């Protein structure tokens, strides 16, 4: 079975969580006030792309991904998911939810049953499920399907989650921090398998990760969530063009900085390196070289860190 890749759109979405109670180790019960997961988030997910979803802890990434998978509902605003021209509200929508696979670090497995039982469940509810892919990947990751998930290490559970996401071949496949617990060889094997399967079976893939340096090569689009709002939603190339680094003598660099927003600065003796928001035009780049200033690109991970730094205030 083949299905067109799903896209998605959020329009001015707010998600608030109600008050909750918890008990401290001393036995005292305290009340936590209502929190906000998303605060007016709007963005469009292009169908048929690999989109990186980035954000600091608590920024709202998981809340947004849960909305797309119909695990939660917005307090206000609208969410639609589906193929181009036929997007619908995913909440209690069997057609949309059967085509959406969210893989969370927790695994979403039946802990009291053998792993094979969970795999049969996913095979039943995912119309595009590939049993051959699941079997091959579990063999690659050395996972024994006769074991209960509770008997697996954290890394093996993560590998099972990655397997379910890839084998589902869902038109919208979401990996939310699925790499947690995996060692480096397993993570890199997962990335390679993701790219290969995506090329052979196009779909929309959302990949949330804190290991930006490792996964940025996969991204076609990037979404950055910052304090409940969408800070950036653009192609990976557009985001990479958002910053430039200048390295040289302090006086020469200062003349080039001007009124630009400075994202980061390092100094060693008389040499300074400054990361600026925005690029340089041809004339500015030529002036920098003439002044003996080295102009460099900024890795996507560094840009993400600097742009979401609460100490870096926009002018």
Image (tube, rainbow, N blue to C red):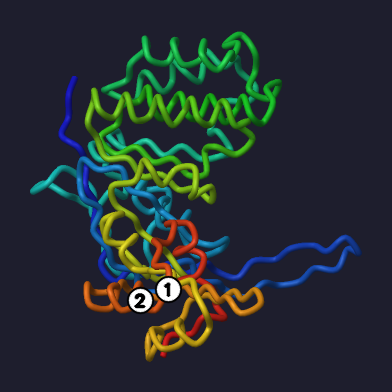
For the C terminus, the image quarter is: bottom left
Which numbered dot is residue 310? none
Between 264 and 101, the residue placed more toward the observer is: 264
Secondary-structure class at tag 2: helix
Q: Is residue 119 left or right of residue 110?
A: left
Which numbered dot is residue 293? 1
Q: Where is residue 35 shown, x and y percent of the image?
A: 55, 72
Q: Where is residue 133 shown, x and y percent of the image?
A: 38, 15
Secondary-structure class at tag 1: loop
Q: Where is residue 251 shown, x and y percent of the image?
A: 49, 87
Neighbor class of circle 2 (other Cα within 10 Å; few <14, some 14-19, many 20+) is: many
**Is 237 above or below relative to 174?**
below
**Is 241 above or below relative to 51?**
below
Neighbor class of circle 1 (other Cα within 10 Å; few <14, some 14-19, many 20+) is: many
For the point 29% across and 39% down, which residue is it? 172
Q: How many marks?
A: 2
When asked about the image quadrant of residue 10, the answer is: bottom left
Q: Is residue 237 left or right of residue 188?
A: left
Residue found farthest to the left: 85
**Which residue is denoted by mark 2 in the rendering?**
288
For the point 48% across and 25% down, which residue is it? 189
For the N terminus, the image quarter is: top left
**Is 278 above or below relative to 24?**
below
For the point 29% across and 69% down, which residue is it? 77
For the point 24% across and 23% down, which residue is it? 200
When asked about the image quadrant of residue 243, the answer is: bottom left
Q: Earlier in the sequence, mark 1 or mark 2?
A: 2
Residue found farthest to the right: 26
Evaluate if marks 1 and 2 touch, with contact meaning CB atoms under 8 Å apart: yes
Mark 1–mark 2 Cα distance, whole angstroms, equals 5 Å
Q: Is residue 220 left or right of residue 274?
A: left
Between 74 and 227, the residue placed more toward the observer is: 227
């Amino acid at each position: 079975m083949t299905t067109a890749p799903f896209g998605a759109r959020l329009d001015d979405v707010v998600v608030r969580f109600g008050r909750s109670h918890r008990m401290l180790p001393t036995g005292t019960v305290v009340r936590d006030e209502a929190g906000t997961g998303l605060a007016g988030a709007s963005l469009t997910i292009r169908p048929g792309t690999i989109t990186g979803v980035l954000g600091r802890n608590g920024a709202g990434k998981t809340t947004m991904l849960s909305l797309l998978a119909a695990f939660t509902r917005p307090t206000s605003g609208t969410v639609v998911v589906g193929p181009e021209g036929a997007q619908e509200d995913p909440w209690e929508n069997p057609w949309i939810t059967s085509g959406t696979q969210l893989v969370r670090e927790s695994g979403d497995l039946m802990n009291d049953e053998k792993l094979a039982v969970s795999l049969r469940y996913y095979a039943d509810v995912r119309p595009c499920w590939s049993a051959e892919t699941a079997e091959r990947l579990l063999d690659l990751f050395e996972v024994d399907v006769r074991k209960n998930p509770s008997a697996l290490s954290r890394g093996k559970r993560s590998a099972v989650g990655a397997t379910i996401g890839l084998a589902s071949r869902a038109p919208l496949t979401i990996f939310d921090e699925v790499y947690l617990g995996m060692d480096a060889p397993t993570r890199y094997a997962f990335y390679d398998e993701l790219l290969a399967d995506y090329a052979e079976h196009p779909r929309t893939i959302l990949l949330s990760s804190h290991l930006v340096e490792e996964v940025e090569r996969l991204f076609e689009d990037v979404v950055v969530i910052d304090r409940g709002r969408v800070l950036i939603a653009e192609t990976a190339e557009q985001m990479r063009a958002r910053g430039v680094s200048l390295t040289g003598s302090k006086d020469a660099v200062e003349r080039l900085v001007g009124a630009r927003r400075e994202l980061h600065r390092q100094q060693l003796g008389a040499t300074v390196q400054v990361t600026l928001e925005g690029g340089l035009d041809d004339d500015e780049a030529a002036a920098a070289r003439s002044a003996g200033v080295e102009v460099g690109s900024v890795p996507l991970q560094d840009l993400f860190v600097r742009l979401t730094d609460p100490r870096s205030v926009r002018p």
